[in-house]
Image (cartoon, rainbow, N blue to C red):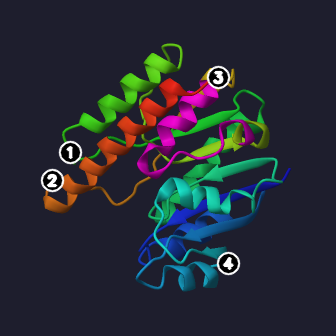
Amino acid sequence: MDIAVLIPAHDEAQRIADTVEAALAIPGVTRCVVVDDASHDDTAERADTAGAKVVRLTFNVGKGAALEAGAERVANADVVLLLDGDLGHTASQAVKLLEPVLAGQADMSIATFPKPAGKAGFGLVKSLARFGIARMGGGWQAEAPLSGQRALTSRCLEAVRPFASGYGVEVALTVRALRRGFRVVEVPTEMAHAATGRDLKGFVHRGRQFVHVALALVKLALERH
């Protein structure tokens, strides 16, 4: 069984090495590909030192396009893990995502995270994403509609590509998988990442997320399936 890890990363120098090392330590993982989305720091160098195969992008293209840029590097794997670069050592929890996929119980598994101690945002983006997935995915109720931590069979990955642009990528992955008859499950994990706060930077980030998710839903509504 060949398991590959694909990680898009932008300015994740503080955590990327821990993320890569934890991912590579998961039983069955044969390689980890990090797509450096034109970082301003030494994300690429640290990922390379930690053992990842690094794809360096000249211009910042966003999460979805970064995933697409690295997709061919993992296309021949039996199972692909999609992970964010800021998971650090908690990336080891991705082993839980593999369990239902390797057991033949799911084609795509999605990580849910523990509830944060404090409130990071107002939940508008998550509510929009959850509504869109239920509306376009046959009523499927997502607990973690924006989770980027996933395990997919190669057949499922090929069916849901190309990756949607920006922060709409997760919603598009789920909706396309459900529309095409793949089995999707959510798996509780103890993963943790850098949360976005209620400061100006956080509001700007969530605003971009909202727009990207809305655009992805519009495109999905027009997509033939």
- Are the residues at dot 1 and dot 3 in contact (C-beta closer than 8 Å)? no
Residue 34 placement, left or right of 219: right
Residue denoted by label 1: 121
Q: CA distance from mark 4 to mark 2?
A: 35 Å
Amino acid type, mark 2: Arg
Q: Residue at the spot x=61%, y=36% of the render?
A: 109
Query: Closer to the observer: label 2 or label 3?
Result: 3
Report the magenta residues as a range.
Answer: 158-178
The kind of residue tagged 1 is Gly
For residue 51, the mark is 4
Q: Position of residue 98 (x, y in %)?
A: 68, 43
Residue 26 visible from this viewpoint: no
Q: Residue furthest left?
A: 199
Residue at label 2?
A: 198
For mark 4, give the secondary structure.
loop
Residue count near mark 3 (Cα–Cα under 10 Å), binned few <14, some 14–19, many ≥20 = few
Point out the tag, 4 or 2, that comes first from the N-terminus: 4
The one of 7 and 102 positioned closer to us in this rendering: 7
Q: Is residue 146 above or below residue 89?
A: above
| Residue 159 on the magenta span | yes
Please tell me how crowded label 1 is: few (under 14), some (14-19), or many (20+) other residues with Cα within 10 Å.
some
